[in-house]
Amino acid sequence: MMNFTQYKAKNNPVEAVNLAVEAAMKANTKLNAVVTMVDPGEQLNRLDQYAGGKMFGIPIALKDNVNTSGVLTTAGSRILGNYVPQYDATIAEKLREAGAIVIAKSSLDEFGMGGSNLSAATGPVYNPYDLSRMSGGSSGGSAVLVASGVVPFAIGSDTGDSVRKPASYNGIVGYKPTYGRISRYGIIPYASSLDHVAFFTRNITDAAIALEVLSGRDDRDMTSLQLPVEDYASLLNPSLEGKKIGILTNVLKAITNPEIQAHFANLVARLKEQGATIVDIEMNQDLLSAILPTYYIIANAEATANHSNLDGLRFGVQKDGKEIDEVMSASRTAGFGKQIRKRFVIGSYALFVENQDKLFRKAQKVRRLIVEDLKHALSDIDGLIAPASAGVAPKLTDTSMDQLSSTYLIAENYMVMGNFSGYPSVTLPMGYCDGLPVGVNLTCKLYDEQTTLNLALAIEQATGLADQIKEVA
Amino acid sequence: MNRYEPEYFKTLAKQLRFSLSDEEARAIADEFGVLLDQMDLLDKIDTEGVEEMVYPIEAETSFMREDEVGHTFTVEQALFNAPRQANDHFVTVKVVG
């Protein structure tokens, strides 16, 4: 299995793509990761015009909430089960112009609204390390296609931790850049103030190259940053001399799994050996405990509004009715899964006039306090690290965790801070517990992608866990 | 005891233009207690004088563009995904008497 540089050196896109298509079809019988296979023929025919592209000839997958002209795009929902976009998302254009070849549209939790990939209209995605376990979500299909060696790169989106958590469960890199760094034009939304385009690779150097390809101002996305694209890959520098890394102790205290604690302690010891100064950082415990409910209120309220256009009238699957209200209700009832309808109800509850001050506006204020606390935590350090989850990928049927425990509220959900703040954040492999991968998460200052990538590369060198693959038989 | 009856969630769903089965409404009512307990965690936090945070980056990213046509759709493209269409229009059931 190759990295970007090896693909380019081999310079045989037809063979690479054919192998990836074959691998995808084979792996999919076990993983259920693909919604639609994309015929690469036309892309290969016009590939010559993109010679020299930074991802030339590399087979990739896109999460199925990325609009692709002429290719079915469902967002994991029955209501878009027949939707064929008539335009490309900006990132689809950018990847094409860099020479990448899309071979598959990958499964996701319906509209990205979940962390398990169990709510996908096409059914659960299975973890390649143990098929009885979940991939994590919402970008589960993309995660397992990279982890199983089918493609070296796949697009995801990250509204809570929807790339960074599955990266941990599947032993790969999940990179979420600064909010606005990558255009969201043409991405079917979940919650606009939290949605980020993010992606999976198997090593940090590939992540740096991909970020160069994907970044940049896009006038079609009003939240797109007006900042230049830097040469992230050529500027990569893993030196930890003079670097100060903070350990988020609230998360460590909330984790009860001794193996994860041991892997993290080993990593910290190696980072010290490489010259880093390590300091403990304790954030406000009440604020961290409030991350999940704050997220739930804001994300579901925004989603309720964002998806009000899905009514079966102008696009999507329509059900019959005698009156227009009946058509909309029948289409939305049949089109949305039960998890999503539940979330819309919660979002609507938070937006009721009588609840707006107590819930919605309160959550927006708490969000500011959480971001200010994170900013303060990062003020004197270069990056903040902690295990990316409290455990390995759960079993598909596991719902045993106490949802008011700090293990759940903090250790399983603290990475949402990266979405509240928009700060760059990356998860990468840290070790294995009984053969199942666990990751470490790193968050850095706003806009500072280079430090994020540099520290992540140092972590990758410390663990020696670049290019991890788990093929499925 | 649940703080809201299943019927309450059915009413909310109706306002959102979808329906819930009896079983779905009961499941939400059962779960809602935990959600409200989680939401109560916000009450521990003093937000007096704090301004709402609507977007993570509050720097200006909008702009005035030149008044030029760009990124347009043809009628065919606009109607491509329409469940029903006729004479270059979307077709729905009758909305006026």
Image (cartoon, rainbow, N blue to C red):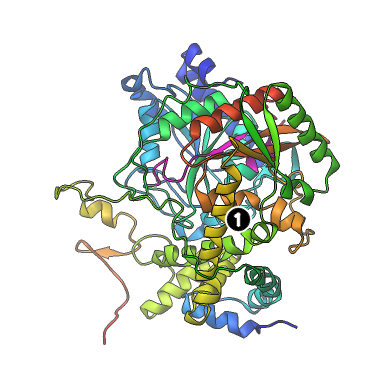
Left/right placement of residue A343 relative to residue A411 reads: left
Q: Amino acid at mark 1?
A: Gly
Please report the residue visible at 32 percent of the width from the left and 76 percent of the height from the top. Answer: B93
Question: How far from the left and from the top, in percent, is residue A203?
Answer: 60, 26
Q: Which residues are magenta?
A: A166-184
Quarter of the image where one finds residue A430: top right
Q: Position of residue A288 (x, y in %)?
A: 66, 56
Q: Is residue A125 magenta?
A: no
Residue lying farthest to the bottom in this orientation: B97
Residue that mark 1 sits on:
A114
Q: Is residue B22 left or right of residue B69?
A: right
Residue A243, by quadrant, is top right
Left or right: B68 in relation to A365? left
Is label 1 in a helix, a strand or a loop? Answer: loop
Q: Residue at x 49, y 78 (%)?
A: A352
Residue B41 visible in rendering: yes
